[in-house]
Amino acid sequence: MPETTPPPAPGTPESFRPRYPAIEKLVDSEDFEALNASYGKAYDELEKLAKEKGVGGSRDAKKAMRALERVMDLLKYLLRLKYEFLAAQQGGEKSPQKKNAGETQLQGNRVR
């Protein structure tokens, strides 16, 4: 019978730590080309739907557009945190190339 590790004790930090491997991999790799392409395509389609007549579909499309914008804001925030943590670990200032990487690599927030 294989040996299993016991689950973390209730109340320990590890017992409350959610894991998001896809997001972690994306932020670690900083390969946003596929994400930017998908985002642009989805946002364009939603813009078309938002401009069509009809209250329900237009309203829902605008809500979805705002949701996409929030996701991109969150990813930018995670990148910024990553660089702040790296700078704190190194005990120095971020390099100029990495300082605004989250702002340059991620597209998004076209129109609010």
Image (cartoon, grey):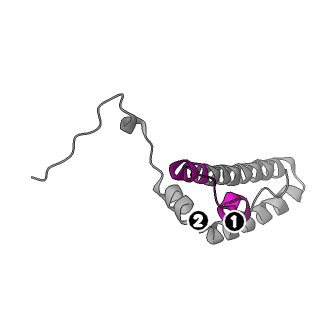
Question: Are the residues flagged by discs 1 and 2 in contact, CB closer than 8 Å?
Answer: yes
Q: Position of residue 88 (x, y in %)?
A: 55, 47
- Counting residues from the start of the chain, the first of labels 1 and 2 encountered is 2
Residue position for label 1: 105
Residue position for label 2: 30
Query: Spatial distance from mark 1 to mark 2, Cα to Cα?
Result: 8 Å
The magenta region covers 83-105
Q: Three-letter amino acid code at disc 1?
A: Gln
Dot 1 surroundings within 10 Å: few (below 14), some, or many (20 or more)? some
In which quarter of the view is residue 33 placed? bottom right
Q: Position of residue 23 (x, y in %)?
A: 53, 56
Picture residue at 64% right of the left edge, 66% below the top = 35
Q: Position of residue 43 (x, y in %)?
A: 76, 61
Disc 1 secondary structure class: helix
Disc 2 secondary structure class: loop
Picture residue at 63% right of the left edge, 67% below the top = 32
